[in-house]
Image (cartoon, rainbow, N blue to C red):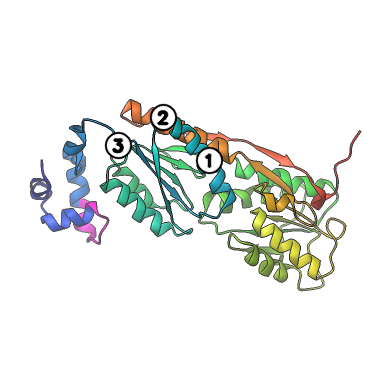
């Protein structure tokens, strides 16, 4: 069945059907007609072309949110380690933390010949789900989870909970929080939930004036810390969603004459080189990014060989790295 025949069955024009499969604008009525026809016929463009392929391309598309990110580099290293051994080549694309570009690149790989896609996702929306459902090759999502799809993720909630609890158990009673957008279910929502859980378990209240939302960089962490530390009533510890945000907060503390950890404790997630080398080494959670890349690549290869997707989620754990920013560890 070609697209003209499908459009006739759906009761829409060929151009409308084409717009649907290319994520263009359609009225709700036409979209419903097309989706009903897909459900009835099982039609998907290029399926016949794919079925007669005589060889694989040995190409895998990898969608990255940021080329300069240390965590992305570690994930990519793990992916490359596995796929290189199987003679696959990587096509790396950068979205610059723009979820719309994620959709564009998914569509690009959907229309071009790759054997699979690994998506390091930032935000997963219903539109993402719609595009992913149309993919003709296996896809593995790294860093986020979405029901029905292959995912490799981290225990973000557990990491933030443990770090916050660590500071509170050392006597801190005025916790602050510098997070990222809640649209990011892992770094934003899950890390907030872990922080909030630790605070409530300690019998404390999360004060709104001690909560800030930053971007994923040092400058933003610095600016948001300035807000938290601008008055006379300030936090005595801050959990930051990422190491970069924490480094910005530490710079702000130094400018204000606050001593870390004596006046204020700081912790975060990421275990980056910059956090280890900071003037006060940063307590952080090590997430197994390279392992995530290895597991994602192996999951993708399994799906490529199998020829179908079962949709499973693998959650990796974390390791707390305690350094001077929360006080030195006691040794026996």
Q: Is residue 74 above or below residue 211?
A: above
Find out whether residue 26 is within the magenta segment: yes
Q: Is residue 224 above or below residue 164?
A: below
Instruction: Say whether residue 73 is visible.
Output: yes
Q: Are marks 3 and 1 in contact (CB under 8 Å)?
A: no
The x, y position of residue 110, in whole percent, is 29, 46
What whole-number distance in Å separates the C-alpha atoms at marks 2 and 1? 15 Å
Q: Quadrant of the N terminus?
A: top left
Q: Please indicate whether residue 24 sits to the left or right of residue 279 in the image.
A: left
- Image quadrant of residue 255? bottom right
Q: Which residues are magenta?
A: 21-32
Find out whether residue 314 is within the magenta segment: no
Residue on which disc 2 sits: 86
Sequence-first tag of 3 and 2: 3
The x, y position of residue 123, in whole percent, is 47, 53
What whole-number distance in Å separates the C-alpha atoms at marks 3 and 1? 21 Å
Residue on which disc 3 sits: 57
Q: Are marks 2 and 1 in contact (CB under 8 Å)?
A: no
Report the residue at 59% width, 50% height from top: 70
């Amino acid at each position: 069945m070609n697209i003209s025949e499908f459009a006739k069955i759906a009761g829409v024009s060929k151009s409308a059907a084409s717009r649907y499969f290319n994520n263009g604008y359609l009225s709700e009525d036409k979209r419903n007609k097309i989706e009903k026809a897909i459900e009835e016929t099982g039609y998907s463009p290029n399926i016949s072309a794919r079925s007669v392929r005589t060889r694989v391309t040995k190409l895998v598309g990898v969608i990255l949110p940021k080329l300069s990110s240390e965590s992305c580099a570690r994930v990519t290293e793990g992916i490359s380690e596995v796929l290189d051994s199987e003679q696959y080549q990587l096509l790396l694309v950068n979205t610059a933390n723009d979820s719309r570009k994620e959709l564009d690149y998914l569509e690009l790989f959907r229309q071009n010949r790759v054997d699979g896609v690994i998506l390091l996702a930032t935000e997963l929306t219903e539109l993402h789900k719609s595009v992913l459902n149309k993919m003709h090759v296996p896809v593995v999502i790294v860093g986020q989870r979405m029901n029905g799809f292959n995912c490799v993720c981290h225990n973000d909630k557990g990491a933030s909970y443990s770090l916050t609890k660590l500071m509170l158990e050392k006597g801190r009673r005025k916790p602050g929080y510098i997070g990222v957008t809640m649209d990011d279910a892992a770094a934003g929502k899950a890390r907030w939930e872990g922080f909030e859980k630790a605070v409530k378990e300690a019998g404390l209240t999360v004060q709104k004036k001690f909560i800030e939302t930053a971007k994923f960089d040092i400058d933003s962490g610095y600016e948001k810390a300035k807000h938290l530390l601008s008055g006379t009533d300030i936090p005595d510890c801050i959990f930051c969603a990422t190491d970069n945000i924490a480094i910005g907060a530490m710079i702000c503390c130094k400018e204000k004459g606050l001593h870390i950890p004596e006046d204020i404790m700081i912790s975060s997630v990421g275990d980056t080189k910059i956090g280890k080398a900071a003037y006060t080494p940063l307590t952080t959670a090590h997430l197994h990014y390279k392992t995530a890349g290895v597991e994602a690549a192996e999951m993708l290869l399994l799906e490529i060989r199998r020829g179908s997707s079962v949709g499973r989620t693998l959650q990796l754990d974390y390791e707390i790295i305690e350094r001077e920013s929360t006080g030195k560890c006691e040794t026996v």
